[in-house]
Image (tube, rainbow, N blue to C red):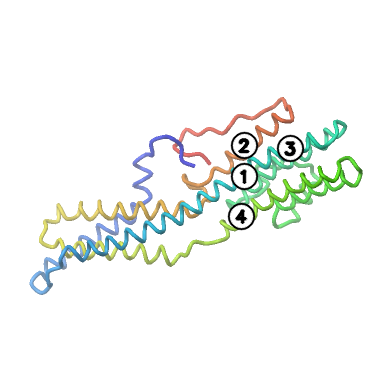
Amino acid sequence: MLLEKRIPLSYIIKNIKKEILYVILVGVVVHFLTTVFADKLPEMPLTVPAFLGTAISILLSFKMSQSYDRWWEARKIWGAIVNDSRSFVIQLQSFIGPDQQALIKKIAFRQIGWCYALGQTLRGKDALSLSGSYFTEEELMEIKKHHNKPLAILQMNASDITSLKTENEIDVLSHIQLDNSLTRLCDSMGKAERIKGTVFPTTYRFYLTWSIYLFVIILSVALKNVDIYFEMPLLIVVSMVFFLLEKSATFLQDPFNENPTSTSVTSIARNIEINIKQLLQEKEIPQPLHSDSFYIL
């Protein structure tokens, strides 16, 4: 997630340096060809590249809008996870008797581990790399048997809550409330997995990128009578705008990748850990994650 810090120019250039090199190459080649065959080429009115540039702007606007919708939905999902995780622990403390404090802590710690495990899973990493300390050896062995490890963790918590109901440690209404909290957490997990598993149409980016290159070629032809020292900076600046917008949209459409614009699932999980441990009145409370860079993961 981007922070309120100045984004370094090096990061911006790094994202589009390959495209700019292509633009320079295309511009030089087209300028050379239009110079050699100047007598045989018809005049290219500037309205042609202007029309194509307008069409590209509309396509970029649509892609940016759809990508932002995916990014914002991902952030809302993790906002719901924060709320439901805190509510779940408060419900445990409210509904379960004081003689079950050890079990409350066990379930609450599993919830912390679940948040870390879900974040790592969405990033395609080892689900237990940040959360192994919140489970016993027996629990870890059981979780590792499952392909969907966050789901296995939710199942463990549901099993313990069911046992409390069977032993009459909680009443029916309390059981329903706790079950509803687990259901909401499972729903949020499913929504996040849906975003992660739904690929934004790759053909859209392919066609859009080549449309920008076509725009550069047509604009270069229209500017054939302009000196190359003025033409090249113009081509670079105009194409940079298009490519930067396209790159921004591409990063936003995958909110769980480790990009600066991605949802900061690890930082959010750390905040949930802090909240839950404070609710449990634990002595060792970690600090929120900080970053010296312009973004945080």
Q: Secondary structure at mark 4?
A: helix
Tell me the distance, in whole angstroms, between the alpha carbons under discs 2 and 1.
Answer: 15 Å
Amino acid identity at mark 3: Val
Name the outermost residue toward the front: 173
At 55% across and 50% down in the image, what residue appears? Answer: 74
Residue tagged 2: 270
Tell me residue 273's x, y (percent): 66, 35
Tell me residue 135's x, y (percent): 76, 42
- Rendered position, 192 above or below 173: below
Classify residue 287 as left or right of residue 66. Answer: right
Name the outermost residue toward the right: 167
Amino acid identity at mark 4: Lys
Choose the circle earlier in sequence order: 2 or 1: 1
Q: Nearer the viewer, mark 2 or mark 1?
A: 1
Residue tagged 4: 191
Residue tagged 3: 89
Q: Are marks 2 and 3 in contact (CB under 8 Å)?
A: no
Amino acid identity at mark 2: Arg
Classify residue 279 as left or right of residue 163. Answer: left
Choose the circle earlier in sequence order: 2 or 3: 3
Tell me the distance, in whole angstroms, between the alpha carbons under discs 2 and 4.
Answer: 21 Å
Tell me the distance, in whole angstroms, between the alpha carbons under discs 1 and 4.
Answer: 11 Å
Tell me the distance, in whole angstroms, between the alpha carbons under discs 3 and 4.
Answer: 22 Å
Name the outermost residue toward the bottom: 40
Residue tagged 1: 80
Quarter of image, res 281: top right
Q: Nearer the viewer, mark 2 or mark 4?
A: 4
